[in-house]
Amino acid sequence: MAKSSRASVKKENNRRKAVSIYGPAELARNERLSTKLLEVARQPKPEPSTDVVMETESKHDEDAMESDNIETDNKVEDGETAMDVDIKEPLIRDGAAIPFTANARTPTVTMPRLKAITTGSIPSFVDLILNLDEADTSSSLAQQDSWLAQLKAAGKGKLLMYGDDTWLKLFPETFDRHDGTSSFFDFTEVDHNVTRNVPMELDRSDWALMVLHYLGLDHIGHKAGPRSFNMVPKQREMDGIVKTIFKSIESNDHLQSTLLVLCGDHGMNDAGNHGASSAGETSPALLFLSPKLRAISRGLPAPTQPRTEFDYYAAVEQSDIAPTLAGLLGLPVSKNSLGAFIPDFLPFWPSSSDKVQILIRNAKQILGIVTAAFEPYLFDPRSTADPCHMDATDVNVLACDWRRISRQSVSMASSAKIDPAWLSDTATWLRKAQDLMSNMATKYDVTKLTVGYVTAMVALTMACLAALAQSTSADGNSLPLVIVTLSYGVMMFASSYVEEEHHFWYWSCSLWIAWLGLRSIRRARGLRPAFYHLLTLGCLRLARSWNQTGQKFAGEPDVVKMFLVPNPQLTWALVTLSYAVVAFQIIGNLYGFPLALRLSLTSVLVSAAFSFKLAFTAHDAPELVTGLASRVNEALQGPSLILRFRTLFFFLALFTVLAVVRRNHGGRFVQPSARLLHNLYTLFAMTQSRALNIPLLVLASVVCRCLEMDDLSVADVTTSCLLLQHVFFFAFGGSNSISSVDLSSAYNGVSNFNPVAVGLLTFVSNWAASIFWTSAANLVLLQRHGRGRNDNYFNHIMLLTLFATVSMAFVMAACTALRTHLFIWTVFSPKYLYCMAWTFGQHMSVNVAIGALLHRFGAA
């Protein structure tokens, strides 16, 4: 009976938590500050009544919104300061600006972080998915409590928004004047469209809130990294805007009570991306600026040095912005908020009773969330149960501290001076409650998890049965593939192995190629095949050193950092060589046409591809286009990047039609036509890859040619294909982190946002090398098809499907079993998303669908 009673209580608590904590809340509550506190809040001196929130996306060590750029004297590589220190640093020193380092919890992408900033809640990981779909409306906060909704309900003035239209999607019909921007194509006009509204609005006095969300820094980071040539000028531009706004606040009477909040929604890693949990991504800066802050702040040293990597000033949670702004604006705290009022602003209220009330109201608001999840009697002073004498669990300790704090608050409110010890204890309690509820803010539907896992197991069983039914000795030994598959699956239960997965593929592939070489020697086929495998090992060694990836060694030296970036001439020599190799391959596969015609057609196609890549790189990373490359780019100036890409795509389509027509003639044209399609894809993959990674596709071509020199079975080809797909995916800089997703080529040829086009281009950009090996494996299999085996491709796909189903089952099992793990949202959940992309994107769409078309095309 006792067990049944506890189960009923737990079930009821879960129901209440779902309804009262993380579900929709009313737009505004009737609860308000006390009459005395409202009077204080309305006074112009201690209470800023107008709010300017300036949001600037993406920060890094040279980014204006990263903690170390607001608070230190870091220099960029050319010796210039990252920001004009005459703006923010003097304001910090004289107390007109109060800086913080705001902890942004994962996922560090825009939509979830804006939810935390405006509601104080802990966003769901599903917001990471919704963040990618600009057409999505299900993420709206129109029915949730936020300080924006409270401000609008208070009727203090109009609400304005200029910048990232994510705000308009989150808060529909909230802003009275707005101009949303969504362009990912540039980092100039997208910010000018925001700035052009600032002077006009600063002259008006009818608004209570103006949000300025700049996207330029984020776009520069995604396209060219944090050390881009464009980063410093953009930082200066942002600094000038801060200067303009602050001077307007000082000089205009109607802005005397305005608070400028300068913050970033997330940070940026060394590659210019974000979404994961590195220090650079989770440490955006937070700066409150107002002349009236001098009354409560004595100033802080600026610049300063960090205690840890990004720990410059006091650390706060990003969700703390919500209750802090609510308190400063005289508004109730949002119902779902887990944020804590920042104590640095308590001196705005001279009365101890007001300070106590601010903190106690914040504590009671969070207490309502805590008691909806745990037993309320533990926190009730009238209860006979004493949590201070119970087991020292997190909940019991929290309840014990609350009883003591609430008792002491009565005497604190009537005292002339607030006790610093009580203030510290209350702030500590808020943090403990915040951490406790943040760690359990996710509700798992075990039933759906079980259904999903059972479905994966059914797919796995069917794949195993199909593989056993079709397996023959002629297909070769599948044991190496089985060993790789099972080893990979077991590895998914260790977070460190997931983060450093590339090492598994690097070593597995090297061992596999070495074994193939030794086997060719044992078969007494001479040393020539062994030489090809030795050359393959050399290419793999070079490829694995091209880009450092993962977490532990992501910033270590590699080929790109050590040789290519410092030597643009070497970079473009290799890029030119890569395009030349593809050109010669295309010329060779245009078998049957006169040489002059082959040269003419190929030169037009490859020149269009090369000129686009040169112009694209000059636009996004001009520091890589110097010397001869710069002069060639200037000579080819003319059409826009969109027009150039569409022209290239048109030529690729024409050559594809040509290959299809030639293939229909049959006979000696079939194999060259299949190889021509492979060459055309290689050219397209170069277009969708960063210029620094283009030579890797030549290395892949060399490896492919070496494998063709050996007598490989179907199982050998499949194992090689699987290993090389993953090796080159990581060699291109891929990882299991959301922050490694490359969006630099996602909008090639796109003039307006199209989710299908952008999605496909993004996938090709990130899986370019893996798709290459789908086509390359098909070419190797076609050699066996000529020897009379017509089911090679079917057996090949069965083995790949076996790996796909096993890996999916293991990843799902790991995510389910470790759903309470510390790294569930930062390691295992992103891995699950990547697993979905590998299974449905690479395997189902590319290996199965496109691979079948390619095999049928070349097997006629």
Image (cartoon, helix red, strand yellow):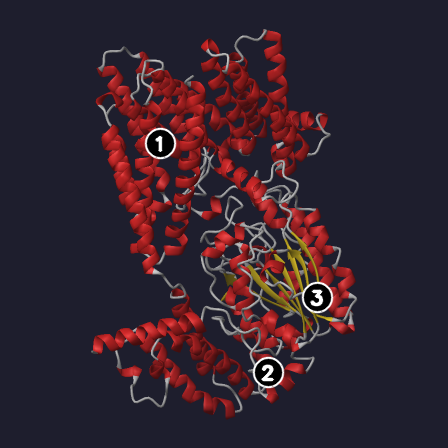
Rounded to the nearest angstrom, the CA distance separating label 2 from label 3 is 31 Å
| Up-down relation of residue 714 to residue 758 (above or below) | above
Which structural element holds mark 3?
loop
Q: Amino acid at mark 3?
A: Asp
Q: Residue at x 33, y 47 (%)?
A: 811
Give the residue at mark 3.
176
| Residue in the foreground of this view, choosing between 252 and 849 | 849
> Residue flagged by tag 2: what amino acid is it?
Trp
Would residue 544 appear left or right of 31 to someone viewing this image? Answer: left
Mark toward the viewer: 2 or 3? 3
Residue at label 1?
722
Query: Quick check: 181 above or below 631?
Result: below
User: Are there few (<14), some (14-19), or many (20+) residues within 10 Å of tag 1?
Assistant: many
Where, by quadrant of the figure, is residue 484 drawn? top left
Question: x, y percentage for residue 830?
Answer: 41, 49
Distance between the alpha carbons at the discs numbered 1 and 3: 54 Å
Q: Give the x, y percent position of residue 77.
A: 59, 43
Instruction: Kindly identify the amino acid type of the residue bearing the numbered disc 1.
Output: Leu
- Category of crowding for the residue at label 2, using alpha-carbon neighbours closer than 10 angstroms: few (below 14), some (14–19), many (at least 20): some
Q: Which of disc 3 and disc 1 is earlier in sequence?
A: 3
Determine whether label 2 and label 3 are within 8 Å by CB. Answer: no
Q: Residue furthest left?
A: 1
CA–CA distance between discs 2 and 1? 65 Å
Q: Which residue is under mark 2? A: 349
Instruction: Return the disc, 2 or 3, that comes first in the chain's sequence.
Output: 3
